[in-house]
Image: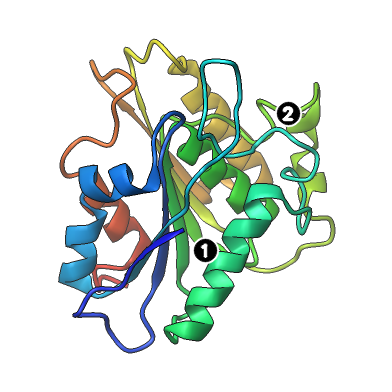
Amino acid sequence: MHLYVPRTATPRPGVLVAMHGCNGGAAEFFEQTEFRSLADRHGFVVIYPQGAKSAKDDLSNCFDVWSEEALRHGGGSDPGSIVSMVDHVVRRHDGDAARVFATGFSSGAMQTVNLLVTHPDVFRAGVSFAGVPYGWFGPPGRGDRARDAFPGYTGPAPRLMAWHGTEDDVLDVALLQQTVDQFAGLYGAGQVEGHPVEGAGHDLPHPGMAARAIGFFGLDGSG
């Protein structure tokens, strides 16, 4: 992982996991998104995991959201590694375990949704940019068994904000409504909001959207 701890980090800082898309990297996501400058402004810590899986021959550096291990609580694979990163940062930097959030683009957006479903005990909310529903890349019917990802969980329901370009030619915008419907069925309609981005392709987040995400998490001091 790449870790950014701003000089302005607050006592007991919140922790944000920010994940790149396939064929991307943690260093590029650090440089190309606004989460670093927002961390400087608001004092939270950002973890940038590095994906290393291949989804297809032409897709490398992806996050695993398809294996049985990745699709269940405590199953290991990339979600297990990311949870371990969070645990390390919370201990090492006295982070606030009650304010841990996830965001990402494309493959990172898929992992954002996956983490909220498989590890709602760790992640309080997520913001996905061009993602898919939980289990969409998994075995047939896996998405219909989202409730089986963490059997018996009775803790707080996480929240999700999902963005998707209406002209996305990689992942169809119809996946936005599917994600919202699935999440609402799991946690309630009040826990999710979806935002189609008119005219946008597979190129999110646009300027200003990261700040919307930070506000959704309450990491900007808004609560």
The quarter holding residue 14 reads bottom left
Q: Residue at horizontal 28%, vertical 51%?
A: 30
Q: Report crowding for label 2: few under 14, some 14 to 19, many 20 or more residues within 10 A (C-alpha).
A: some
Report, in whole angstroms, how far the alpha carbon at label 2 lies from the one at label 1.
24 Å
Q: Which mark is residue 138?
A: 2
Left or right, 173 with reference to 35: right
Choose between 7 and 195: the one closer to the eye. Answer: 7
Q: Which mark is residue 208?
A: none
How is the model colour-coded? rainbow
Q: Return the x and y of residue 13 as percentages of the image width and height.
A: 36, 79
Q: Is residue 119 visible?
A: no
Three-letter amino acid code at the position of disc 1: Arg
Left or right, 55 with reference to 135: left
Q: Return the x and y of residue 197 as percentages of the image width and height.
A: 28, 25
Q: Which residue is mark 1?
A: 124
Q: Return the x and y of residue 135 as percentages of the image width and height.
A: 69, 32
Q: Residue at horizontal 43%, vertical 29%?
A: 23
Q: Secondary structure at mark 1?
A: loop
The quarter holding residue 83 reads bottom right
Q: Return the x and y of residue 87 as percentages of the image width and height.
A: 58, 74
Whether residue 142 is situated above or below residue 27 in the rendered picture: above
Q: Residue at horizontal 57%, vertical 26%?
A: 178
Left or right, 164 with reference to 177: left
Quadrant (top left/top right/bottom left/bottom right) for the C terminus? bottom left
